[in-house]
Image: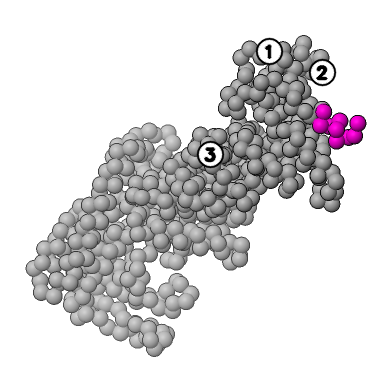
Amino acid sequence: MSVRQRLGNDLSVDRLPDLPLLNKTCTKGLTPAQIEAVGWAHDAILLFTRFAVLVDDDNPALRGMVLQLWDETGIWKWMIFLYNANADLNETIGNKRRPFPMTAAEMKSPIATLLLACTDAPSLLKRMAAVPDVVSLTGMLWMEYSLEFPGVIHDGLISTIQHMLELKTAQSVLSTLLDAVGGAKIFMQVAVDRFRRLTSSKPLVKEDITPQLRFIAFLVQKFNPILGEVMHAVDAISVAIPAADSLIEQVEGPSHVGTCIQTMILPHLIAATSHQPLIRAINQGLLRTLYEARLTFLQPDESHRQIKETTQFIVNELVAPCLVLRTVLHAVERSGLLADYAKIRREDGMAELLPEWEALYALFVDIFAAKQMVDAVIKYFCGHPECAREDKLKRCARCESVKYCSRVCQQRDWPRHRRDCRKGEILGLESLYPVSDRQFDGKLASLQVRMQQRSLRQRIRVDPKLAAAAAAADVVLTVDFSNVEHNIIIDVVESSIPCVAVAVFAIVKSGSEIFTLLAGEVLLTELLKE
């Protein structure tokens, strides 16, 4: 008998009892024949695995024999039977074939080992991916092993799934995987939950985090919007923000932080269809996280460029246009907007500003509704760990990222909070600061500046010193702001941005808050208090 014939006989599926469906187990009342078949299946899978790991394109004879065995013996049927049996071989049965009894988990381990062996052989991988039951089995094992620490088998199954999804049949494979685990939401929830567990453990183990983060990035990028939009449904940003904080603190280098922000935070914000998810993200510390990331990787290193660009993109393109917190409402609630409306309607030359005012007011209505919705489900507590007070909280005037119920609590918490709070002073205007939104107030300020333009023109003068330093095409002017209405200041200052020698700033003071506009565009700059 040839080697191939002997192997075919040992691996023959003919010895299997009736095969149950993949999604149904035969754990209750295994017959003696089924129990015996569990041992056969275990041995058959181990035997085939030994040959699968030897498959090499340089040995076409062996490769052909293993592929033929796969096709003829139906080795995947042994895998499915062993998985469905879910049997613990008790000591009596176990000692008939092995020196020790084997648990159900140990019996499933060879299945994963065989899947990994096939992953490293492209020809076997294609055969494996062509069998829907094997694809489903891979997904179900991956979900079961997601709780494994360390994730040796889980990480291997990640590799198997990713290799399957890189084949030409990727869409079919993905559909089968999602059906097996219960849908796209559950699939991504499992991936995100494991990432949360890995990043919440201390100290972080970079080797465990890397494959999981890369796997999530691969899924989101290759199968967007199918899986990208699901990141929003599973609230991935609630995991990503504290994860990014932990990575910034414990892992050297920007790669993990950048991937976390680009893969889990950015898609979440892009997929949002309302203000609510963004407000939640801000309340969970989004701006602080972006600020910390930018601060940590501020050095002029090419490897840091991407993370700085990503954080700036999120702020400029996503956060700034629709960031909606208490600051936004304060300016409107002081009736300034309604007073402006009356002035626009009353004075000549203001009619062209009416559509802009109406759009601004519509934005306010939308903002107010979104804020009420969020405030209904979010609770705020005093930032001092020993105090649990929930009412009459005021923000830290320096960083606005923490609230306190009293000055006493703030002073007691200052030794702990000082390290984070002081970081708002380190960078210049071009940097990202952890402050509340300016966009709405910036639009209001821009409108007010143009409403007051007649008064402002009368106070404009050229600053000789700055004019001499600026290029001929630059606009260089200052304003005597001692008697300007609405506390609007226009001034020229030396810019902290290298490519701009001097810049025109419009500063609108609303109560105790100062909003800075550079060339008419809102900057997220440090909140200044009187």
Instruction: Name the one closer to the observer, 4 or 271.
Output: 4
For badge 3, the amino acid type reads: Leu
Q: Which residue is mark 1?
A: 31
Q: Nearer the viewer, residue 310 or 183?
A: 183
Q: Which mark is residue 178?
A: 3
Which labelled disc corresponds to residue 97?
2
* Disc 2 from disc 3: Cα separation: 37 Å
In the rendered image, the vertical position of residue 380 relative to residue 287, given as above or below: above
x and y percent of residue 416 in the render?
48, 43
Quarter of the rendering occupied by the C terminus: bottom left
Please count the marks in the image: 3
Q: Position of residue 67 (x, y in %)?
A: 77, 41
User: Judging from the image, what secondary structure is the residue with disc 1 in?
Assistant: loop
Residue range of the region highlighted in magenta in the rendering: 1-9
Is residue 114 among what the camera can see? yes
At 10% across and 67% down in the image, what residue appears? 345
Q: Residue furthest right?
A: 1
Q: Earlier in the sequence, mark 3 or mark 1?
A: 1
* Nearest to viewer (mark 3 / mark 1): 1
Give the quarter of the image for residue 332. bottom left
- The numbered mark, 2 or 1, whose residue comes first in the sequence reads 1
